[in-house]
Image (tube, rainbow, N blue to C red):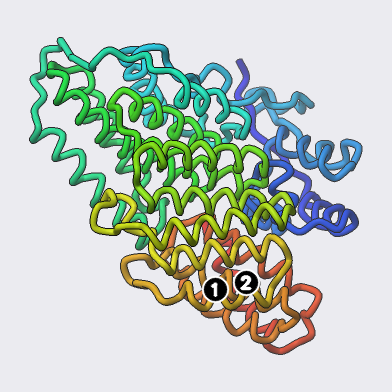
Amino acid sequence: MPRQNLAVNPTFGPRLRELRIQRGLSLRRLGQQVHCSHGYLWDLEAGGKRPSASVAALLDAALGAGGQLRALVTSVSADSGGLTASVAAPVLDGLGGLEFAPDWRHGAEVAAELWRRDMQRRDLLVGAGFSAAAFVAPAFRWLTVRLDEPPVGDGERLVGQPDVDTIRQITSVYRGLDNRYGGGHVRDGLVRFLDMEVATLLRGRFDAGTGAALFSAAAEATQLAGWTSYDVGLHGLAQRYMVQALRMAATAGDRPLGAEILAAMSHQAAYLGASAEAVDLARAAGRTAAESGIAAIQAESAVLEAQGHAVGGDEAACAAALDRAERAFDRAERTSAPQWIGYFDEAYLSAKFGHCFVALGRGETAARFAVRSLEMDGHAYARGRQFNLALLALAHAQAGDPEQASVVGCQAAEAAEGLRSERARGYLATLADRLAPHAGLAAVQEFSHRVRPVIQAV
């Protein structure tokens, strides 16, 4: 088969921006419609990245462009030098990873195959499609089906508690690095660990107690791999990791971790604008957390439900969920909560309140919560601090203060240096888009100059 490269007309970026503005869409809103990050769309408009033919077709449909953008992207045969007009097929057809396997052995093999393909065929996986609806069946099966026999392995490699402890300790190290430096710095190493080490253990020899602990640890590591994939904008791949993490948590009988994974699914769905699915997933997480009796996860689930309602514009439902989140947080016993939810504190809760009010267009209220969100450990959670600075800047912009938004935006841009996080870039791109109409102000010009290299960084 001839090898295919892409040729993109240099007018693609300017035309994309022109069509987007004509439709009155922000980068974030357009990104939600086509399931691409707004940082990626910024790069397309600036000419820093080339779109695939399928992405161009999605943008055409979202913007009602009648094929204008698709016509600017052609496939060039590197072997013949000829031009074709074929649209690229979805690159993850046949990959799998979205199924909630009927038994634990099958589930272990599905997860191991996902890790292997991620390591060996990464160039083919980057464009994996995301569909929030694909979360629904796994979440339903988690809530309603109890299938597994106790996981007892009969392989050659003897697995013991020290192996489980090693997985947990390595996952904890990667989690700390992710919080400080962003998913792009840790994702590859974590996936390599899953593929080369954890897969072997899942095929080993262990009793029921060790097996449950092993699958719990593997689920936690897999959820983190999904989270880091989400952070770098690999949304379809992240979704597959989340589903397999949920399946392994079911094998382990680890209900609190399952609730946390469902909450992460809700988080991703809301970020990509899938309001209804975000709400349903958060409610599934909340139900599981209530069964487990862990108030911290109940509070997290409620605030994520609120964010889903806010993304959908339902202010009353959002307010009711925020009230439940506050009450659950007040009764949470921090010392008894799992260590992996250590990030969920008052600052994190305030940030989520702020995101809800930004989504509802209430900048002044959002700014009050965004200020509180900065009362955090900015060293251990450097990425979170950058997110919260960007949130505060966007709240100021919504409240009609572009100059203060620019000042805080410069701080957010500085905080993004050294992070490898598509979300960090995306929040800055959204802010830049919001401030663009005020380009005549000196503060906005300074912000634009400061943020451009950060947004365009690879």
Residue at x 57%, y 81% (from the top left corner): 408
Q: Which residue is mark 1?
A: 370
Amino acid type for the residue under numbered disc 1? Ala
Residue at x 60%, y 84% (from the top left corner): 407
* Vertical comparison of 2 with 424: above or below: above
- Looking at the rendered structure, the secondary structure element under dot 2 is helix
Residue 276 x %, y % = 67, 40
Asked whether residue 174 appears in the rendered view, the answer is no
Q: Horizontally, is 186 left or right of 318 in the view?
A: left
Residue 445 x %, y % = 69, 83
Q: Horizontally, is 313 left or right of 389 in the view?
A: right
CB within 8 Å, label 1 to label 2: yes
Residue 347 x %, y % = 43, 69
Q: Which residue is mark 2?
A: 366
Outermost residue on the bottom side: it is 442
Amino acid type for the residue under numbered disc 2? Ala
Residue at x 81%, y 56% (from the top left corner): 25
Callout 2: few (<14), some (14-19), or many (20+) C-alpha neighbours within 10 Å?
Answer: many
- Looking at the rendered structure, the secondary structure element under dot 1 is helix
